[in-house]
Image: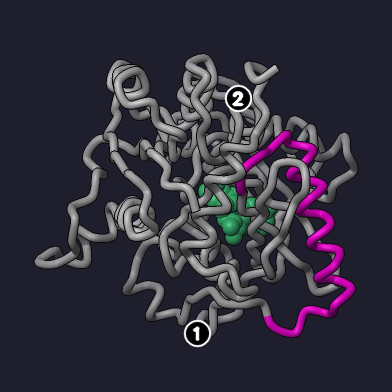
Amino acid sequence: MKRLRVLVIMREGLVPPDTLEGRSEKEIAEWKSEFDVVTTLREMGHDVRPLGVFDDLSPIRQTIQDWSPHIAFMLLEEFHGVASYDYAVVGYLELMRQPYTGCNPIGLMLSRDKATAKRILAHHRIPTPGFSVFPRGQTKMRARQLPFPLFIKSSMEDASLGISQASIVYDEAALAERVQFIHESVQSDAIAEQYIDGRELYVGVIGNRRLQTFPPWEMVFSKMPDHMPHVATAKVKWDREYQKKYGIKTNRAKDLPPAVEKQIMKLCKRSYRALNMSGYARMDLRLRKDGRVFLIEANANPNLEYGEDFAESAEWIGIEYEALLQKLLNLGLGYHPPWKG
Ligand SMILES: Nc1ncnc2c1ncn2[C@@H]1O[C@H](COP(=O)(O)OP(=O)(O)O)[C@@H](O)[C@H]1O
Ligand SMILES: [Mg+2]
């Protein structure tokens, strides 16, 4: 294997220390994925330089000019605090003719904006919940007749920001209130979707032209009562105590009929292509009792933390963590942006 100069780009403040020793669990959680990627790339023999970025591109430019990295490992998820600007940073890397890991700028931009992504998916007849968009500043509530219950979320944010049990609404009054909540507290447009009651599945996809899917992972809510909707709220994703209380974990989805599993894989690949994605992604889906599958969201550059869904599901089919990271490097080096002609 060739020793590569790898510039790992991440948010300022998340540049990890060399060891976990003496750090609290809470501290580690902040930069665990950065730590895993940096230390593993080093263990693999690569020459690795972590770089923290907040609101200045010049260190990126400087390092590319001075050090000529073979590849930039893109772990940055925002620029000056704006999550949707990751596409612009990757665009800048392309302007500098710098190969990088993960998704290209167009795929990042399209998948980040949930409303735009859903319009494209609908055009391709990919099953995704029916929806209406409520732009900030607009007060008119029912843009389109969708039956209740509805699920209200931000059209731009991720990490379940602004998502709680109250995101599911059963009448006009609650809809109006929740849309207003998204406008004000998350400061973004809101999207109302048909609520899909069912199992919560995640599927990893990697590739540029030829795609590979990892087996479906499922979030299980083993101790959550039936009257509480089983959805991945912010508390479900981030609150350890809450996870323990309701028996929330993710694991290989069990007892999926092979035909359904095959259909899910196909749907994920079609969605990835429709949204012009490259590198790697994680698809969020929900499977209803009647066997219908819906794509909820396509996540470009998903969390690479060791032991998290994406890496775990790769390992399930024999792709160990080091091999996974090497695949991402190879895909980045093999990607053909316009500047390569
Ligand atoms: N239409 C929907 N019906 C049912 N649950 C949903 C719907 N949309 C989102 N959810 C739940 O909310 C979670 C977060 O929504 P998602 O669109 O994936 O946003 P994020 O970018 O914050 O992950 C999903 O994993 C799912 O559990
Ligand atoms: Mg999601």
The boundaries of the magenta stretch are: 254-280
Q: CA distance from mark 2 to mark 1?
A: 37 Å
Q: Residue at x 63, y 62 (%)?
A: 202
- Determine the main secondary structure of the stretch shown in magenta: helix
228 to the left or right of 55: right
Using the image, tell me which numbered label, if any, was put on residue 179.
none
Q: Position of residue 181 (x, y in %)?
A: 47, 39
Q: Quadrant of residue 142?
A: top right
Residue furthest out toward the front: 2
Cβ of mark 1 under 8 A from ligand 1: no
> Where 234 falls versus 108 (above or below)?
below
Q: Amino acid at mark 2?
A: Pro
Q: Residue 67 sits in which quadrant?
A: top left
Q: Residue furthest left?
A: 22
Q: Which mark is residue 135?
A: 2
Residue under label 1: 223
